[in-house]
Amino acid sequence: MTHSEIETIISKYGNKESSILAILQDIQAKEKYLPREALELVGEKLNIPINKIYRIATFYRAFSLMPRGKHEVCVCMGTACHVRGAQRIVDQIKLELGIRPGETTKDQNFTLETVNCLGVCAAGPVVAINGEYFGKMSPGKVEGTLKKFRSEKKKEGANGKA
Amino acid sequence: MVSFKIDGRSVEAKEGTYLLEVALDAGIEIPHLCYNESVKPYGACRLCLVEVSRKGKSRMTTSCNYPVMEGIEVLTQTDKVLRARRMIMELLLSMCPGDKLLQEMAEEMGVREVRFKKEDKDCILCGLCARVCDEIVGAHAIQFAFRGDRREMVPPFGGEAMNCIACGACVVVCPVNVIGMKEEGDERTILRWKRTLKMKPCKVCGNYFAPWFQLEKFKEKAKLPKDFFDVCFTCRS
């Protein structure tokens, strides 16, 4: 993300200190995380001390300070999914990807997150990958579901080399 | 001026002042940790709880950030208040079991045991250091980060506090004394914020008296002449 892109976002909200959350959300949406340089620039432009911005950025779970993977895997841990074994799904994904919730794989392909309800309890246990919902999940289905996103990456990698 | 009662005593105070400072001025002891008269009240430690009755209704509230009002009746030593304070003390102690001041205060308040799981933190998250740094010093070097049980007081992005001028205000003001400052040769370190700065020697006595970075900031802020800080504070007078 370039300086001018960030400046465009800031001026879109009228250079106001009170718009800090909206600005951070826009940066998060575009970059999938909040780069340190971006936070520093926002602070400079809006005249907000960096310690205050860091406080805001770490307070909300919607913000991440670490680069996120290409695919975001969200496992629903809401009550309905929980009683149908959401924990076992998380465990299986942890095994498959080798990461814990909140972490990103080394190849920057997957980020694992748990959420407290995705709103489709009837289809539980639910996993959402990049906003696409996979209902009636079971530990056995995990590998196949993740594969789609894996192979896509591999193909791209091959193309890139060729 | 507004007049009201604390523990049956009639008190007068200026409008806009807060209960705790009025009580302390009147010689009424209320335990507190996160309050300091030089910064805005914050109500983090909850130890200064009192019972306030207003228009016949009574409720418990922190006195440090409760503005005085005409005709209120304040009780600082009721069983209800003391019980609540003991509980808060117990919780604080379970978070930071090693703090000497907390142990002494707990002893005084009659907290005999800690029934909760003990953690090994030392900071009570009162936020006083950050408030002093923001409001008084203006360095904005530290602030709370994260939330809930993961909340901590850290420099932005962890690591070294890049805005810290190593003035030591936070070290002095910390109620549980866990920040720490060290001076060795020409270097001053604020231990908790991992900030080490080179100090400037006085042109007269040769003693190192303050960090370069700090003096430059002061000069820039107050638009002082270049040689203003060449001589240390003792040699100048």
Image (tube, helix red, strand yellow):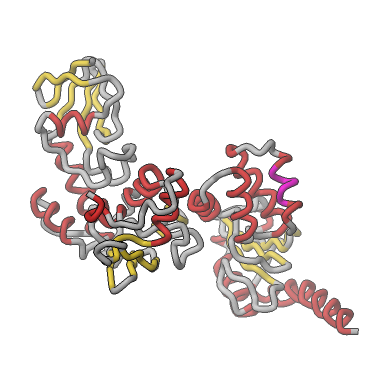
Residue at (58%, 70%) from the top-left corner?
A103
Q: Quadrant of residue B9?
A: top left
Residue interval drawn in magenta: A6-10
Q: Is residue B179 visible?
A: no
A154 lies above or below B81: below
Q: Does A94 lie within the magenta span?
A: no
Residue at (15%, 29%) from the top-left corner?
B75
Furthest residue in direction right, as rendered: A162
A71 lies above or below B15: below
- Quadrant showing the N terminus of chain B: top left
Give the side of residue B128 with respect to residue A160, left or right: left
Residue at (67%, 65%) from the top-left corner?
A73
Query: Residue B236, position in %: x, y?
Result: 25, 52
State the residue in front, B232 or B61. Answer: B232
Q: Quadrant of residue B12?
A: top left
State the residue in front, A145 or A103. Answer: A103
Query: Residue B159, position in %: x, y?
Result: 46, 67
Q: Is residue B187 visible?
A: yes
Give the side of residue B216 with respect to residue B34, left or right: right
Q: Main secondary structure of the magenta part?
A: helix
